[in-house]
Amino acid sequence: QIPLSSRSLWKKFAVKEFSEKSDFERDFVHHIETTLARSMYNCDDLAAYQAASNTVRDKLIVEWNETQQFQTLKDPKRIYYLSLEFLMGRAMDNAMLNAGVKDLVKDSLSELGFNLEDILEQEPDAALGNGGLGRLAACFLDSLSTGKYPSWGYGLRYQYGIFAQRIIDGYQVETPDYWLTFSNPWEIPRHEIQIPVDFYGFVEEEFNPQTNETKKIWKGGERVIAVAYDFPIPGYSTKNVNNLRLWSAKPTTEFDFSKFNSGDYQNSVRLQQRAESITAVLYPNDNFDQGKELRLKQQYFWVAASLHDIVRRFKKTKRPWSEFPLQVAIQLNDTHPTLAIVELQRIFIDLEGFSWDDAWEIVVKTFGYTNHTVMQEALEKWPIPLFERLLPRHLEIIYTINFFFLQQVEKKFQSTYSQKELENLLSSVSVIEEYYPKQVRMANLAIIGSHRVNGVAELHSELIKTTIFKDFVKVYGDKKFTNVTNGVTPRRWLREANPELAELIASKLGGYEYLLNLNLLKNLENYLDDKDFKHKWDIVKLNNKFRLTKLIKKLTGIEINPTEYLFDIQVKRIHEYKRQQLNIFGVIHRYLWIKSLSPKERKSLVQPKVYVFGGKSAPGYYMAKLIIKLINAVGELVNNDADAEGYLKCIFVPDYNVSKAQIIIPASDISEHISTAGTEASGTSNMKFVLNGGLIIGTVDGANVEITREIGEDNIFLFGNLAENVEDIRHAHRYAPHLELPESLKQVFEAIESGKFGEGDEYKPLLDSVRYHKDYYLVSDDFDSYLQAQELIDEAYKDRDDWIQKSIISVANMGFFSSDRCIEEYAEMIWDVEPLERD
Ligand code: GLS
C-alpha cells in the first residue's frame, strides 16, 4: 500500500491512455527505443508490430486494472469459464476495433512509415484450440467482456498450440507451432502467482482425539508449480476489460540436492523438465478422447490451480461459505474440467472441514456443464488404475460421490423397477464403467456434480436427452437439461473479418450499433429493392473473393480469376462425420460430367465453380489424412486439365486457422455443412458464413436447423436423411449382405480406382468404408440428394439478383446467432449473474 501522503504523486504520474495520434506516436517510439532497444535505423515490421501492440496493450491494461479493482470493490457474483481450449487467433486488430482506435493507429503508423495491414500480419495466431469448441470459448470471452459480465476464463498456456499443417506431395505433415518465439505483448506474466499442484502419492488417515474423527490427508508424491499468465480481454465499445488466466507449469524451486550430491545431476534436471512438459503442448484431437496420462495431468494441473485461485478470491471477501454459490458460477466447457467438481469437494471436506453433505450441496449449485458432442469416441473415460496412481484421493471421493448417487437412484426406482431393470439403470448412470479395465466416465460425473447440463443447439440438446443421457433424464427429470444454441461474436466475424460488408451495413443502419444488438440487422430487409445497395452488396462479395484468391495464390501458387466462379467452401476439422469425403466425391462427379461434355455444351451447361477445402486432421487419424490426400490429388488433376479450365478448380488451403478463416469465410457464395444428421452438435462456422452473406448447402443437423428457421427454407439448400432415420439406416446397412451404391457414386469410385488420382489402391480404405464397412456416415445414402442440391445451387446462382436477395435476407435474420445472446441465456438460466456497469 502506498502511504496516503504519496498518492497524489502517484496520481500525477499514473499512465494516461493515448487518445491522440501524437500520444500513440510518442508511446510507439518509446517502446521501440526502450522496450525493444531498437532505433529508427533498425526498425522492421516485426519491431513495429511489437511496439504498436505494446502501445495498444498499455491502453488495455489501464482499463483492465480499473475493471479488476472495481470488481473487487463491488464483489459481484463472478462467472468462471473453464476451458482447455481458447482458440483466440490474433489479438491486435480485435483490441484496436474494440477500443475504437483502429483508424487512429493506422494513421499514426502511416505517418511513421508503416502500413497497418503489413504490421498486423506479423502477429502469430494464438491457436490454443482445435476447432469449434475452442473458438466458441474465445467468442464467449468477447461477449462476456462486451456484456460487462464479471468473469474470468481459465485455461492452459500451451507452449505449442495446434500444430502447423504443411501439405507435402498431397499429404498432411505436422510441424510444431511455437507461437511464443518473440515476446508476447498480449500476456502479462504473473510470476508472483505461484500455486503448488501435487500428483501421485498416497492417502493417510489422521485421527483427531478431540473430535473423535478421522481425517483423510493426501500426501502428494510430485509437486509442480502453476504460474499465472493473464490475457486482458477487451469488450467492444466498453471500458470493461476482463481477464483470461492461463497457467504454465514450472518445476518447484526446491532443487533435489540429494540427487545432485550423489552425482545424479542429470536426473535431477530431468524432473524439472518433466514439470514443464505438462503445459508443453495442446492435444491435437477434436471430438476424440485419446486417454493419455499426460492429458489427465494437464486437466488436474489446470483445475487445481484455477480452483485454488477462485477459492482464495472468495475467502478474501470473508463471506460465509454458504454464500459460495451466490458468488461463484463455474462453467465446464465439455468434460475436460470435470475434475473441478471433485477438487472443490476435496477442498471443502479435507481442507476446510465441511461435512460431506454441506460440501456437496455447494458444489452442485456452483457448477454447470456444457456437452458438445454425442459421439461415443469423444466421451472421456479414464482407466481406474491410472486414476488411482495419479490422484488417489480424488478417486476415493469419486467413489463416494457415486455411492451416494446410486443409493439415491436405487431408492427412487426400487419399488417400480424390476431387479434387472434397476441393475441396467444403475450400471448406465454409474460414474464407474465396470469393464476391463474399469473406467471413470467423466460425462456422468459432470452431470451428477452440476445443477444444469446444456447442449449447444436445439437438435443436439434433444438428442442428448434421448440417447447418451436418456437414463439421467429418468433420474432427474428433464429440468436439469437445457439448451443454449451456440453463437459467434459479430465483432470478429463481421466487422474484423469483413470490414467492407460491415461498413455497407452500417451505412444503411445508421452506424455500428448493430454490432451490439445484432437483431438490428433485420432492418436490412427495408433495402431489398434498393438497386444501388444490392449492387454494392455484390461488389463487396467480389472484393472478398479477390482477397481470398490472393491468399490462395500466395499459399499454393494457383491463380484464379474470381469474377468467373461460384465459390463453394468447406473449412473445418477433417473428420469422417463432417463428410469432406462426400464433398470431394461430388467434385469428382462434377469433373467427370464436365469431361463428358463438348466445349459448346460446357459453355452453356456448366456453372464455373471453385471448391475450397481447408482443415486439419488429427495426426493419428488415418482416414481423415487419406481424405486430405484425395482432395489434393483431385486438385492436382483438375486444376491442370485444359478441359476443366474456367469451369472447375479444387483448392486445399494449407494450415487453416482463425486468421485464414477471417479471409476465407467472407468470400463464400456457398459453404458446406454436410455432417451425417445427428452427428454435428451445432457447428459455428455455418453461422459465420451466413453472417457474411454466403448461403449454405447442409444437412438437417446441428444449428443448421435453427439457421433455416431464422432465414427461411428458401434461402438454404438442405439435403440428405434426417437424424431420426439414421439409426434405422445404419441398422439396415449392418445386416445387408452388401451395400448397393447409387450409379453416380459407382462412377466416382471407378474413376478413383482407375488411378486417375494417383495409385487407385491408396484410397481403398476410404472406398471400402462406404462399400464394405457398413457406410456408418451414410455417404451412399445421401450422395444423390447431395448432387441434386448442388444442381439447385447452380440453377439459383444464374439469377444473380435473386441470389443477392437471398444473401441479404439471410444476413438480416442472423441476429439470433450472436454470442451475446448465448451469454445472456447462460447468465439467466444457468449462472444467475448480472452485468456490472463501471461507473
Ligand atoms: C464441438 C462440436 O463438434 C461442434 O459441433 C460445436 O459447434 C462445438 C462448439 O459447441 O463443439 N465439439 C467438439 O468436441 N468439438 C467441436 O467443435
Image (spheres, rainbow, N blue to C red):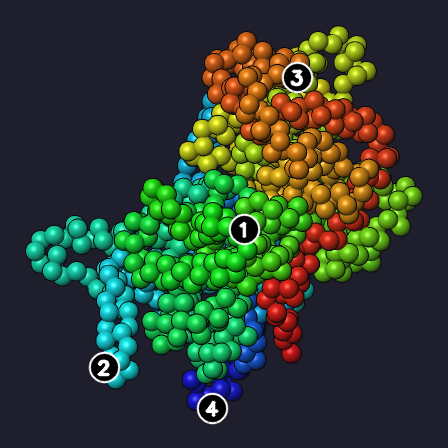
Residue 79 coordinates in the image, percent (x, y): 55, 67
Q: CA distance from mark 1 to mark 4?
A: 62 Å
Q: Amino acid at mark 4?
A: Leu
Instruction: Measuring from the top left, give residue 158's x and y in whole percent.
Output: 41, 51
Say which element carries label 2: loop
Q: Is residue 593 left or right of residue 427?
A: right
Residue type at numbered disc 2: Pro
Report x, y in % for residue 132: 57, 46
What's under tag 3, amino acid-wise?
Pro
In the image, the residue with mark 3 has its CB under 8 Å from the nearest atom of ligand 1: no
Q: Residue 209: give its label.
A: 2
Residue highlighted by disc 4: 4
Residue 661, position as x, y percentages in the image: 60, 41
Quick one: SS at disc 4? helix
Residue placed at 37% from the left, 67% from the top? Answer: 346
State the CA–CA distance, disc 2 to disc 4. 50 Å
> Which image quadrant is residue 228 in?
bottom left
